[in-house]
Image: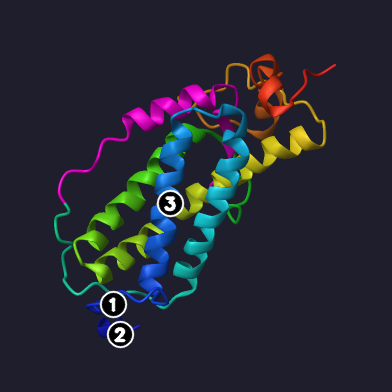
Amino acid sequence: MSDATLHASTQNPDDFVVQIADQVESFLVAVTEVAKGDEPESAVPFLLLEVSQLLLAGGRLGAHEDIVPEERYEPDPGPEPDVDELRENYARLLDPIDVYSEVFDPYEPRKAPVPARLSDDLADIITDLRHGMVHYRAGRTTEALWWWQFSYFSNWGPTASAVLRALQSVLIHVRLDQPLDELDGLDTDQAAMGDETLEFEAGRVMAEEIGGPLGIRPGQ
């Protein structure tokens, strides 16, 4: 992609940078609305949809040739917006299913799953995307694309993939009428656990709290 395309004075909706920015902006607006908790019964399927669509943008960034910024050092985008309120809202909204287990690299043998939080992961993704959006809105489109591509590989891409799998798992349990088990005592401040420990720690996931909205029934 040429700099002439990236820095065109008029934004063509067919331009790669405009399409990526539109997908990023759509995700940011949507997840901010979901975090308000006005429709908790639709939070999980809606987040599944939004994260899936975001990963489409990530896939396009990943398949694209390496984007090289114009300057050696990244221009200072200013202070990062605070995401603590969003993080806390998601922690409350997703409380019964917030903690999940994840394997960071499936190609590293015998790596134990570690606990993670959907609320933390969503906040991290939002932070990365907002950072690039600051560059985009300031007209530094090459810098924005570079940042979104770089952080897709280094952080928000793997994180979004993990979030997608967790949300998908919740809906699979619901739609196939397979009651979730509680991660009794599992938390993100614990050391990494092996498969057997995680299996042992899995008890019933507070089905009474999310059973109504999500259709999850307690285990028999």
Q: Mark 3 points at which residue?
A: 156
How far across and down, in percent of the image, does residue 87 sit? 39, 31
Judge from the rendering whether residue 18 lies leftward or rightward of residue 35; answer left or right. Answer: left
Q: Is 108 placed above or below 45 here? A: below
How far across and down, in percent of the image, does residue 184 sit? 63, 17
CB-based contact (under 8 Å), mark 1 and mark 2: yes
Which quadrant of the figure contains the C terminus? top right
Q: How is the image coloured?
A: rainbow
Q: Kindly indicate the quadrant of the structure image that contains residue 6.
A: bottom left
Q: Give the range drawn in magenta.
A: 78-104
**Dot 2: within a 10 Å radius of its alpha carbon, few (fewer than 14), some, or many (20 or more) residues?**
few
Q: Mark 2 points at which residue?
A: 2
Identified by mark 3, the residue type is Trp
Identified by mark 2, the residue type is Ser
Marks 2 and 3, how far apart at CA: 26 Å
Q: Name the residue under label 1.
A: 6
Marks 1 and 3, how far apart at CA: 23 Å
Of helix, strand and loop, which one carries label 2?
A: loop
N-term mark: 2 or 3: 2
Residue 137 part of the magenta segment: no
Judge from the rendering whether residue 131 lies leftward or rightward of residue 188; answer left or right. Answer: left
Looking at the image, which is closer to me, 71 or 213? 213
